[in-house]
Image (cartoon, helix red, strand yellow):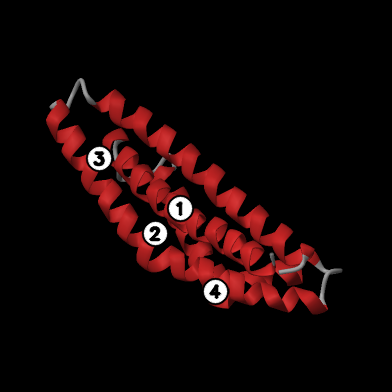
Amino acid sequence: MHNAQKVSISILALLWTIGSIRLLFSGSFLLLGSVGTIAPWIVVLCSVLAAVIGFAKGKFLLSKTASRSITNSHSLENNTQNLFLGWARIMGVRGLIMISLMLALGFFLAGPFSPLDGFGRGLLRIAIGTALLIGSFSLWSGIRSNNEALS
């Protein structure tokens, strides 16, 4: 993995990590705000369920996307000038469509016209944040394993 690949995948991993931490914190605060209206054991049970769903999504969907991104980053060897084209090659068409749909759905569900209350938005953020964190682990481990292979 040469520098352009390593930097691009590191930026992607960092974005996923920061996004996941932000979602996990904001989801936790929304869930804590729901404790007054919903029994605490229900909040904990639903939070664990959301984290398990997020873990499954991260393990079976985003980890594959991360692996494809690392594989696709090899195309950067021929193109280090055009950043947008490089990112499009790394993410691939399926990855860009999936991320665009996930972002659009997230904006809809978190916006002012959301059908979800704070509790529902908190659970959604916990699930998505967990999935992103698992996906970012795949990216970081891919960078590390490529570095070890070169050593």
- The CA span between labels 3 and 1 is 16 Å
2 and 1 marks in contact (CB < 8 Å): yes
- The CA span between labels 4 and 3 is 30 Å
Relative depth, front residue between 3 and 27? 3
Q: Which residue is mark 4?
A: 68
- Is the C terminus in the top left, top right, bottom left or bottom right quadrant? bottom right
Q: Is residue 97 visible?
A: no
- The CA span between labels 4 and 1 is 15 Å
**Quadrant of residue 1 within the rendered picture:** bottom right
Q: Is residue 135 left or right of residue 35?
A: right
**Quadrant of residue 91 within the rendered picture:** bottom right
In percent of width and height, residue 36 lies at 20, 20
Q: Mark 4, mark 3: which one is toward the viewer?
A: 4
Looking at numbered disc 1 in the image, what kind of residue is underneath it? Leu
- The CA span between labels 2 and 1 is 6 Å
Q: Residue at x 26, y 51 (%)?
A: 52
Q: Is residue 45 left or right of residue 139?
A: left
Which residue is outermost to the right? 81
In percent of width and height, residue 85 lies at 75, 72
Q: Residues within 10 Å of mark 3 (few under 14, many from 20)?
A: many
> Which of pointers 3 and 1 lies earlier in the amino acid sequence?
3
3 and 1 marks in contact (CB < 8 Å): no
> Which of pointers 3 and 2 lies earlier in the amino acid sequence?
3
Looking at numbered disc 4 in the image, what kind of residue is underneath it? Arg
> Which of pointers 4 and 1 lies earlier in the amino acid sequence?
4
In percent of width and height, residue 71 lies at 60, 76
Q: Which residue is mark 2?
A: 58
- The CA span between labels 2 and 4 is 14 Å
Q: Which residue is mark 3?
A: 47
Q: Mark 3, mark 2: which one is toward the viewer?
A: 2
Q: Residues within 10 Å of mark 1 (few under 14, many from 20)?
A: many
Q: Residue at x 33, y 55 (%)?
A: 55
